[in-house]
Image (cartoon, rainbow, N blue to C red):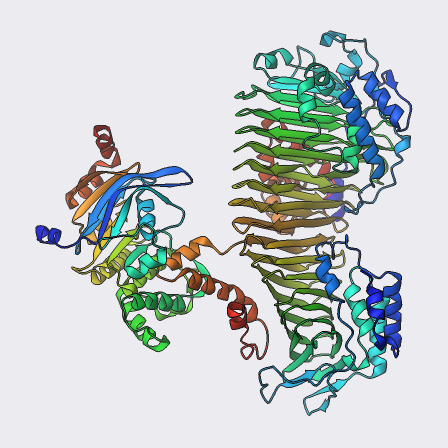
Amino acid sequence: MEIIEKIKTNKSIDNQTEIQKICLDKLRSRPLPNPKSEQWRLANKSKFSNFLDYPVNEKNPKFDTPFPNTSKSTIRLVIGNNCQINLIEKNYSIQQLTQDELDKYIKSQIFCFDQNENWSDLLNLSLSNAKNILGLKINGSKIPPIEIFSHSSGNSLNAKTLVIFLEKNCDVELLQVNLGKENSSLSQLTYFCLEENSSLNHGVVSYGENRSNLLNSLKVIQQKNSEYNLGSLHFKFDYARFEISIKQSDGYAKTNIKGMQVTKKDEQISTYTKIEFNGPNGFLDQINKSLADDESHAIFEGSIIVPKIAQKTDASQLSRNLLLSNLAQIDTKPQLEIIADDVKCKHGATISQLNEDELFYMRSRGITLPEASKLQLSSYFQEIISFIPISKDRWDLLDKLLNEK
Amino acid sequence: MQSKMKESEPILEVENLSASTDNLPILKGVSLTVHPGEIHAIMGRNGCGKSTLSKIIAGHPSYNITNGGIKFLGENINSLEPEERAQSGIFLGFQYPIEIPGVSNLEFLRVSTNARRKFLNKEELDTFDFEELVKEKLEIVKMDHAFLSRSVNQGFSGGEKKRNEILQMALLEPKIAILDETDSGLDIDALRIVASGIKKISSAQTGIILITHYQRLLDEIKPNYVHVMSDGQIIKTGDSDLALELEKKGYEWTDNFIKET
Amino acid sequence: MVKENLVKDVVKEPYKYGFVTDIETEKIAKGLNENIIKLISQKKEEPKYLLDFRLNAFKKWQKMKEPDWAGLGYKQIDYQDIIYYSAPKQKEKISSLDEVDPKLLETFDKLGIPLTEQKKLTNVAVDAVFDSVSIATTFREELAEHGVIFCSISEAVKNHSDLIEKYLGTVVPASDNYFAALNSAVFSDGSFVYIPKGVTCPMDLSSYFRINSGDSGQFERTLIIAEESSSVSYLEGCTAPMFDTNTLHAAVVELIALDDASIKYSTVQNWYAGDEEGIGGIFNFVTKRGKCLGKRSKISWSQVETGSAITWKYPSCLLLGEESVGEFYSVALTNNLQQADTGTKMIHIGPKTKSTIVSKGISAGNSINSYRGLVKMGTKAKGSRNYSQCDSMLIGDQASANTFPYIKSQQPNSEIEHEASTCRISEDQLFYLQSRGIEFEEAVSMMVSGFCRDVFNQLPMEFAAEADKLLALKLEGSVG
């Protein structure tokens, strides 16, 4: 699999930005993540290779909104569709980052890239051109909810990048929606910087159509007393990978994560999370759910890193998995790496099918097996969905998960 | 009075039933017939097979019927799914009601009630009509409305769980109710509430099987028949006096029956 | 009030097994090549199939790379700088204990393992291994009456060649991993146990491994076969003198349990761990694996790992037989600059198989203590269950504790449950104990031994007490 060869075949590489050039060079020197590395050993090689089978999409086609209507108060942005925003209101402001600010930030990130851990980011930044990078800084209070869309168009490989700075004391609700068109690949890279005392309720909903692929990478830096809540849902991708990296840079921050991936047919969806505590008194509560049906494969790997400086960290991570078919498989690996002694860390993992006692109880009350399963599944899903902020109801997520083939 | 009952068609006929789980025989030829209006009590030591009998009647998938069969309203139900049995009017009150986190009690009750109503060709109830119906039935078991918004049995006390069972029985209006140790873990007040609930719900058209260790539930609900089970068999059948005698003499007394048989 | 250095002091007990026995030994030249392997095989008068087994393993080993996935930090091992065969010089054939060099007997005496008829432990049969050879096995006649074979593996090669040829390398093939391949090429001695059909072994069997020379590696090999409906409890203990060089220990243990058989394998590992600066100590790279071949067979590992500079060890179970059971109970304590990477693999292949994992890691000083485990439900493991619990206790803010559980399921009708937690000895708990008049050190060791209780309960009686003491000694001076 010659990644660089694949990318090079696109004419579009001519007018690259400096960042694109740097990243392409890096990719050229070590084109592929090491398939034996922990982050990539379970990746389905042929599916992963398919990701690069499409030509890079340069022009953004007209974007018709297949999405439910937004309420008036919600701010809706579509990355790549000439989205310009410069809102300065009495209580708050949402402004675009200058090119300079953006470049500087992204370069500082590239500097500390690791080939296996940041391969998706490298690919993203080598492909996404200025039009497909959105940078925002948000300030103030009573900020209206924000929806940000990334989408791929058919028969192409698309890369979108989002950088958001939450300035001190601001409080934001943001739903990110990633949509994969039939036969397409989407690479999404998102950076959040939460300054002191800021808080973000972040939702990520990603789903595709037939034969769509997704590499979704999310990097969050939390300063003191910030709070980051993430509710995420990934389903219906031939191949999808959700990489989350959260760093509490000085401790004293709170992170809550509730994520879920649902795989059917022969799909492979994986979630990799890395939470680092770089200061004392950090808090983490994480649950990741997987459901694997048919011949699909769901993967979760989570690591929690608590160095010596992170005394009084309180972290818990739970991986709950439902395996519904004889041909499906689930891998999970919740890991703790701890050096500090005064910490409370725990993790747990379960893999099972739907609880038989519960099913029998419902059936003994006349509820049919499919209905009883649906009731159980909907409660399984609901815990995650209810954590996804804003407009989740309009998206009929539960209905999509329970009823879509 | 009793002879009159016998003339009517039986609700439930268990015929020489043998069953096993994981190749381990649990029931070894049990026969039992319940007619409308009858209350049967099944007593016996732990592990004698009485709970298994109730689960098999309800269709629990862990057990295999190796011999004999179960007839409900004259039809053999050996191969029916548990939900089909429930919809047609068989109710099992669980000894340990299952907690189902995340599934709301109200939704659970509504879906199951409607499944039964559909079978009876009754109109299915929407949320509003159903709430009306539930309100009425809550009275029977003296339960608070707040129970409905919680997850099924989750965080319920022992007594609350058992009352929730009787509430389900009231909503489903079964032809036969098998109550597996519904009295265990209840204090005397809760026991009265549960017992009076059972009496209110049952009628001359329904049958009841009470599975219990103790006399005290039978003080509240007087059975027509008392069966004593041991090692997967009914070893003695009598009237309510048998239960009293058993209470007095203990299960050791019944060991003699086994020797006799 | 809990003071840092006070707790540090609680772990400083000198290693009391660090003496060297001055005895004339027969050593072969340093280095590893085909000729060395042929020489070892020749010295042991081995049949051809075994020499072929060794040479084949050596070929494989040469093509393999030393594993680095555990991320252990240690000075590269020079495999040409090790002596692969070292034996105390004795008369050609020893027919009774009286002919064993008294110095050797004295050595084992000092280690608390008396071998002579008058003093030998009751109810435990001991096979004592000194460097590369087994020097004595007690209670042989008594065991023979029950048909139980308990002898050194060299002897088994001579007297029970059919069993060796049939089973050796069937659980841990030579190509399994780097250290197993090395062991297969050069293994010197070890124990062999055969429990015939229907026999419950009348006493615990035990091997005691002693490394004496500083420049020779120890490569023992143990094979235990439990025939249908038999059962055995086997204990293993290890010590080594203090040298400022690192000594390599690469053992292989294979267990085979047939229908309804049960094997309980307990280890108290107290190899020399190196000094406070991390100088010296044993590199302990061990492959232990059991095959539950038969229906309802059971293999249970319990281990107390306190020694070695580096421990790399994953006693595992292959659960093939229907309803077979695998267990792993482990306490691993690291202090100073010790590194332990230990855990287990439970591979559920057959239906209705069950496994339990209980792992307790205690890290003090600058040590690194990692649990690494794999639980896998194969496609045919219908109705199987696993429960794992991995707890870590950290003592001092320089120690690290890691948990890496790999969990994989391909069978919906199976259940896997894993729990892990990290804690430390809380000041409140210590204060509570102290306020009841319990000395500080006593309180710490009570807490630690309470933390390990679930595992100690699995150890045979004689071992449980020893393990408790060992832990208290090791911990002396480390709690703060």
Side (left or right) of C186 relative to B237:
right
Counting from the top left corner in percent of width and height, residue A384 is at 56, 67
Counting from the top left corner in percent of width and height, residue A268 is at 65, 61
Side (left or right) of C176 relative to C410:
right
Which image quadrant for residue A215? Answer: bottom right
Which image quadrant for residue B141? Answer: bottom left
Does any portion of residue C249 appear in the rendered image?
Answer: no
Counting from the top left corner in percent of width and height, residue B1 is at 8, 53
Front residue (pair C425, C59): C59
Side (left or right) of C67 relative to B147:
right
Taking C172 as reference, is B176 above or below it? below
Residue found at x 60% / y 15%:
C143
Residue found at x 47% / y 64%:
A374
Does any portion of residue C42 appear in the rendered image?
Answer: yes
Counting from the top left corner in percent of width and height, residue C157 is at 72, 18
Residue found at x 22% / y 55%:
B73
